[in-house]
Amino acid sequence: MINNYKISFQSLFLVILFLSIYGCSSSEDKRLLPSAKGANGEVIVVMDDKLWNEDLGKSVKAALEYPVLGVLKKEPSFTIRHIKPFDFKGLLKEHKNLVVVTTFDLESPGNLLLQESFTGSSVEKIKSDNDIFYKVDRDVYAKGQIAIQLFSNKRKTLTNKIDDNASLIRKILDKEEMERHFMAFNDRLADPEFSKKLFDKHSFSFALLKGYQTVMDTTDFLWLRHPEAKVDKNLFFARRSYESESQFALSNVLSWRDELGKNYLFDPDDKTKYVITEMLEPPAEKEVSFQNKYAKEIRGIWKIKNAFTGGSFVSYIFVDTDTQTLYYIEGFVNAPGKDKREIIRELSAILNTFQVLD
């Protein structure tokens, strides 16, 4: 299982259909486009009012507002702004994330306006093939923009497609948000000398950003902290010998995590207070590809034993097959009263830059 797992985010786009829905722009035209705007995690949904208020609209909302895992206070995966087709103009067209929804069984003015972007041949193909229901474009109206078109011949068909592929739609948008973080990291990197010293010692690298300070640094464990008044962000990296696939079992991962908390993530003034996993809200796990390696992503709640502090965490566990080393890397945050979605999204992006060095 470990050696053969080669699925990556990029494979999601092998199924993208090249229909002539949006007008093509030359490279020169795209260089003249304005930069995309909008808050992180926000999505503009362009959709006729009638469709929005029916089951189709409810399915779109359910797909995009799926609850974020690993947070105590309920938060949606994305914040939606519904825009009527005739209101979709000006700065709204320059938003970072667009989702445009239409079907061909409603002849309302707004829905007909959206249908104008389809060629006759693409309409016929959509009507004859129910498997064709989405298309992804970039830089349609602005640089750094993603536009997802959701469409079908009938409302019921598209509703079912969205229900069945909700996680895929979120993954496409999640990947885009992560890519934007990667781009932003370039201007936020820590002092190269400080980074090199850490990377040379541990034989791995990642996007180490300004403001992170070393708390604990041993042979097989590194803890970095970015303390602020209202948001305390943390990263830690641990490794041990890989022995068997049983080490990927969630119970074993959490046991190791709690062991690391007791040994390293403690209050220096009172070692009876240390990081543990909150099991009243059990962590969620899923199989992912991490640097083309089989991995598990885990999201959950942490707390301090014998204290009343806690927050959210995201982590990855995977094997470097060249050295048969098992890595556990995590980002966790303490931000009382603040939404955690975008903080965890940033920490996840940092972790996804991790690379074992030769």
Image (cartoon, rainbow, N blue to C red):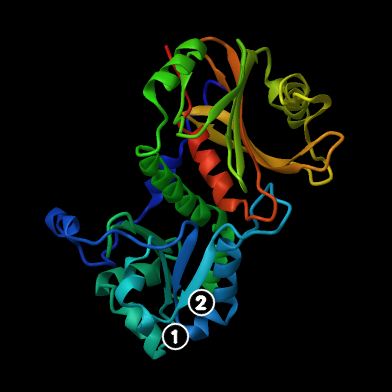
- The reply, left or right, for residue 164 in relation to residue 135 is right
Q: Check contact, mark 1 vs mark 2: CB within 8 A.
A: yes
Quadrant placement of the N terminus:
top right
Q: Is residue 252 above or below residue 152?
A: above
Which residue sits at x=32%, y=58%?
A: 137
Q: Is residue 257 above or below residue 117?
A: above
Which residue sits at x=75%, y=42%?
A: 310
Q: Which residue is mark 1?
A: 106
Can residue 1 be seen by looking at this rendering?
A: no
Q: Which of the two labelled residues, at mark 1 and mark 2, occupies the earlier sequence position?
A: 1
Q: At label 2, which amino acid type do we have?
A: Arg
Can residue 6 be seen by looking at this rendering?
A: yes
Q: Which residue is mark 2?
A: 155
Q: Which of 174/154 is in front? A: 174
Q: Residues within 10 Å of mark 2 (few under 14, many from 20)?
A: many
Q: Secondary structure at mark 2?
A: helix
